């Protein structure tokens, strides 16, 4: 049996084992996927150990995605983004980043094409970076707004866009074709709103990559008549792309989606 896993800390709430094990079952692969609590200081030992034990591949999550660059051989996109969420062992120890393509496919599945559109990304952390590089590569026009404006400007400069602080959202939001929340705001009940609902327009798409609950931003987007997309399908597609990198098989996306929805449902 081939072993796969996700490393992170904390890791006990990860939905990836349910999602990937459902996919392996549907594909008839003799494989299983497990979550492992790994801290930054143990990451190198853990990755080398997984390779030595013949693991098929790994996902990495908070707080390991950036640290992994020191250990694996990142592909061009993962190097640009500065973060690795998928490790494959087929040819050495290769690092990939599937978060951006996961976001892109999630929007496409909702009928939203970013090519030539103005995309406002709120946030400048790991997920925002993955989305910014991937969407810029697709021909989107990118603006970044972040709590720390310096981080926004640095990221924007590297994808050919403009960087802003959150105070500029008042002007930026109404004029964007696609508004993306790539911050962690909204993950918890009672989080403050990132922006006022009155700024959202009915001809926009609003994508909130938070996937564990319906955020106030998405409620406001629906009220405004905008296309509202949550982060669940991004999670599914980033996992689907990882599975395809490891196995070369076409991922059973519907099976993976069902497993994630069931996993989330069981928590409520
Ligand atoms: P990260 O690297 O820690 O970045 C966090 C971002 O959120 C930064 O831009 C930070 O701003 C901003 N932020 C945090 N607290 C804030 C607040 N109170 N007000 C305004 N901005 C705030 O995290 P990440 O890995 O990018 O993840 C961000 C979110 O995306 C998390 O909720 C994560 O679960 C989600 N995510 C979803 C998927 C998916 O598949 N759907 C994939 C990856 C991540 P500063 O720079 O100013 O600190």
Image (tube, rainbow, N blue to C red):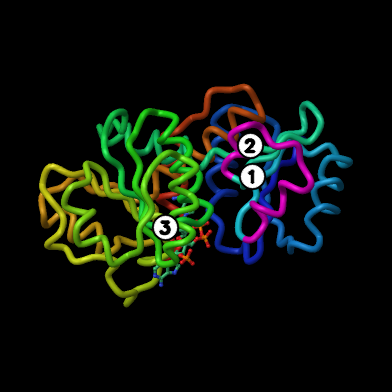
From the top left corner, tell me how far across and down residue 264 is, in percent: 42, 57
Nearest the viewer among 235 and 91 is 91
CA distance separating discs 2 and 3? 21 Å
Q: Is residue 194 above or below residue 109?
A: below
Secondary structure at badge 2 equals: strand
- Which quarter of the picture shows residue 104? top left
Crowding at label 2, few (<14), some or many (≥20) Cα neighbours within 10 Å? Answer: many
Q: Earlier in the sequence, mark 2 or mark 1?
A: 1
Give residue 38's position: percent from left, percent from top: 74, 60
Task: Give the label on residue 84, or none.
Answer: 1
Looking at the image, which residue sits at the far bottom?
190
* In the image, farthest residue toward the right: 52
For label 3, the residue is: 123
Q: Secondary structure at mark 1?
A: loop
| Real-space Cα separation, disc 3 to disc 1, in angstroms | 18 Å
Examine the structure image and report whether residue 70 is included in the region drawn in magenta. Answer: yes
Up the image or down, 134 lies above or below 85; here it is: above
CB at mark 3 closer than 8 A to ligand 1?
yes
Q: What residue do we see at 41% from left, 41% from top? A: 103
Asked whether, in this view, residue 16 is left or right of residue 7, the answer is: left
Image: magenta residue range = 63-81
> Does 69 sit above or below residue 95?
below
For the C terminus, give its image quadrant. bottom left
Q: Which mark is residue 96?
A: 2
């Amino acid at each position: 049996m081939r072993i796969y896993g996700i490393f992170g800390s904390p890791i006990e709430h990860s939905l990836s084992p349910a999602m990937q094990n459902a996919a392996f079952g549907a594909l008839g692969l003799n494989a299983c996927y497990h979550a492992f609590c790994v801290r930054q200081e143990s990451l190198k030992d853990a990755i080398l150990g997984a390779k030595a034990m013949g693991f098929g591949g790994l996902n990495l999550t908070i707080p390991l995605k950036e640290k992994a660059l020191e250990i694996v051989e990142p592909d061009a996109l993962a190097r640009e983004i500065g973060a690795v969420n998928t490790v494959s062992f087929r040819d050495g120890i290769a690092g990939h980043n599937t978060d951006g393509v996961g976001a892109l496919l999630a929007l496409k599945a909702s009928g939203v094409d970013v090519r030539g559109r103005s995309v406002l990304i709120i946030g400048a952390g790991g997920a925002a970076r993955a989305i910014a590089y991937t969407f810029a590569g697709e021909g989107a026009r990118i603006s970044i707004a972040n709590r720390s404006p310096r981080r926004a400007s640095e990221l924007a400069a590297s994808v050919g866009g403009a960087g802003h602080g959150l105070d500029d959202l008042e002007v930026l939001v109404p004029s964007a074709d696609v508004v993306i929340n790539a911050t962690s705001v909204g993950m918890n009940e009672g989080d403050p709103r990132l922006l006022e609902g009155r700024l959202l327009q009915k001809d926009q798409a609003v994508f909130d990559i938070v996937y564990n609950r319906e955020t106030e931003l998405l409620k406001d987007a629906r009220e405004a008549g905008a296309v509202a997309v949550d982060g669940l399908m991004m999670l599914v597609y980033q996992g689907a792309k990882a599975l395809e990198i490891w196995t070369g098989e076409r991922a059973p996306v519907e099976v993976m989606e069902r497993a994630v929805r069931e996993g989330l449902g069981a928590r409520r």
